[in-house]
Image (cartoon, rainbow, N blue to C red):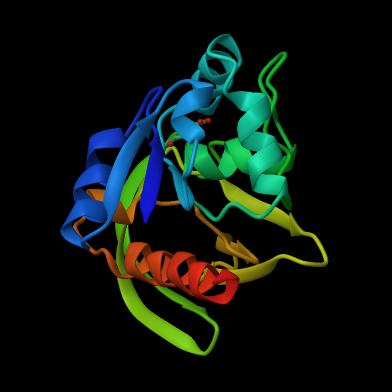
Amino acid sequence: MIVGVLALQGGVEEHLTALEALGATTRKVRVPKDLDGLEGIVIPGGESTVLDKLARTFDVAEPLAVLISNGLPVFATCAGLIYLAKHLDNPARGQQTLEALDVVVRRNAFGTQRESFDTTVDVSFDSAAFPGVQASFIRAPIVTELGSTTEAIAVLNGGEVVGVRQGNIIALSFHPEETGDYRIHQAWLDLVRKRIELAI
Ligand code: GLN
């Protein structure tokens, strides 16, 4: 089983470290041929406008969107969540997304005063609970609307949705890869493994 990490920009190394610590075989994805044979892909945080521009420049955006719409599992953090969203409340001029995740996302939702903060967040899905995930919020987005097939899996005390799931897509506003709390990476790898077993 090989999982990719979209390696155009942002927190690529942190995700590679997390996945390898959990025993996964990884591959950096930059160009379309890097997508061949992947069982899942991680889209890291960084800057969603830059991700978008580079993915289009390297011609990887379109084949990636097709694979995801055909069921390729995705784990995304922060800018990765933004880049997956069908709609953005406040896109930058000309900003495009993969339009794979049926949500509306607001970029930089915590404003300048709280641009970055660390906290703990309870995450739960599929009757599994991950209490107190160590989470780093860095110019983080929030999910402002959920589609009919998308569920909230993490909500802050103020009611802000900061984690969502749609089938084998898990997307978080924050960065557990920065804190060394790899429970959600593990849960997503379990989804990827389950999908392979069901296909056999
Ligand atoms: N605010 C950034 C964006 O719009 C996301 C920040 C992050 O990934 N840490 O893409």
Q: Is residue 113 left or right of residue 64?
A: left
Q: Quadrant of residue 95?
A: top right
Q: Is residue 155 left or right of residue 118?
A: right
Residue 129 at least partly seen? yes
| Quadrant the N terminus occupies | bottom left
Q: Is residue 10 left or right of residue 16?
A: right
**47 is higher (above) or lower (below) than 143:** above
Q: Along the line of sight, which residue is nearer the eye, 180 or 36?
A: 36
| Quadrant the C terminus occupies | bottom right
Residue occupying the far right of the picture: 148
Residue occupying the far bottom of the picture: 127
**Residue 196 position within the rendered picture, expressed as x and y whole percent measured from the top left:** 50, 67
Q: Along the line of sight, which residue is nearer the eye, 77 or 166?
A: 166
Q: Quadrant of residue 141?
A: top right
Residue displayed at 66% across by 20% down: 92
Q: Along the line of sight, which residue is nearer the eye, 66 or 55?
A: 66
Q: Is residue 184 left or right of residue 92?
A: left
Residue displayed at 16% across by 58% down: 21
**Residue 172 position within the rendered picture, expressed as x and y whole percent measured from the top left:** 49, 55
Residue displayed at 67% across by 36% down: 65
**102 is higher (above) or lower (below) than 124:** above
Q: Quadrant of residue 150?
A: bottom right
How many numbered marks have been drawn onto this rendered protein structure?
Answer: 0
Residue displayed at 45% across by 86% down: 128
Residue occupying the far front of the picture: 200
**Residue 44 position within the rendered picture, expressed as x and y whole percent measured from the top left:** 41, 39
Residue 77 at least partly seen? no
**Residue 31 position within the rendered picture, expressed as x and y whole percent measured from the top left:** 48, 20
